[in-house]
Amino acid sequence: EIRSAIFDLQAGPTGAPRLRTTLHDVITELTRDVPLRTTVRMSGPLDVVSAPLAEHAEAVVREAVSNAVRHAQARELTVTVSVDDDLVIDVVDDGVGIPDTVARSGLHNLRQRAGEMGGSFVVEPAAHGGTRLLWTAPLTP
């Protein structure tokens, strides 16, 4: 974690918002006025993520958290973002789970984004109820 913080403190070439900051801002924006206990875990050097992959990451987190807030009736939400050889976004809620008959346009979009980046996408029941969304993409296509 200390190493990740050091990576994030180093100045970047573009002056664009850092991915870690952007994702925290998105999660805060979507959960601000909701009675939902949200845990956010980020590890690894998020600033090595390319700009196109960072855009996908923001969209994935936005869609996953938005779905949990709007549909899950969850009390707890955990968002884990990690970088190693791959960027991994893992979003788990303790809500009602995803129904079989639901419009899946947003989820289709996430699957398409994973495919564009050579990654994978899974939505499944969480281990103790609720839903788990797992999105991964390699750092280098």
Image (spheres, helix red, strand yellow):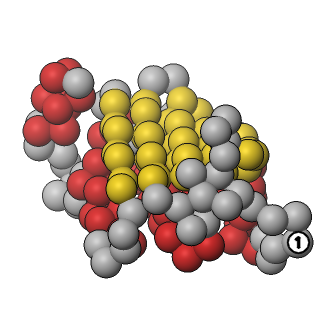
Name the kind of residue labelled 1 in the image.
Thr
Instruction: Identify the residue shown where x is 76% and y is 74%.
Output: 105
Q: In percent of the image, x 24 and y 55: which residue is there?
A: 21
Percent coordinates x, y for residue 72 in the rendering: 60, 66
- Viewport quadrant of the N terminus: top left
Total count of labels: 1
The residue most toward the right is: 101
The correct choice, above or below, for 86 with respect to 111 in the image is above
Q: Quadrant of residue 81?
A: top left
The residue singled out by tag 1 in the image is 101
Which is nearer the eye, 93 or 50? 93
Is residue 24 toward the left or the right of residue 134 in the image?
Answer: left
Q: Is residue 23 visible?
A: no
Q: Does 110 appear above or below 33?
A: above
Badge 1: how crowded within 10 Å, few (<14), some, or many (20+)? few
Q: Name the side, left or right, on which 83 lies relative to 101.
A: left
Q: Position of residue 74 (x, y in %)?
A: 53, 61
Residue 47 position (above or below residue 133)? above
- Name the residue: 43% across, 31% down: 83
At a point 44% along the width and 40% down the height, the residue shown is: 80
* Local SS, label 1: loop
Residue 106 on image: x %, y %: 69, 71
Frontmost residue, 4 versus 71: 71
Looking at the rendered image, the quarter that the C terminus falls into is top right
- Horizontal side of 74 relative to 16 (left or right) equals right
Q: Nearer the viewer, residue 85 or 41?
A: 41
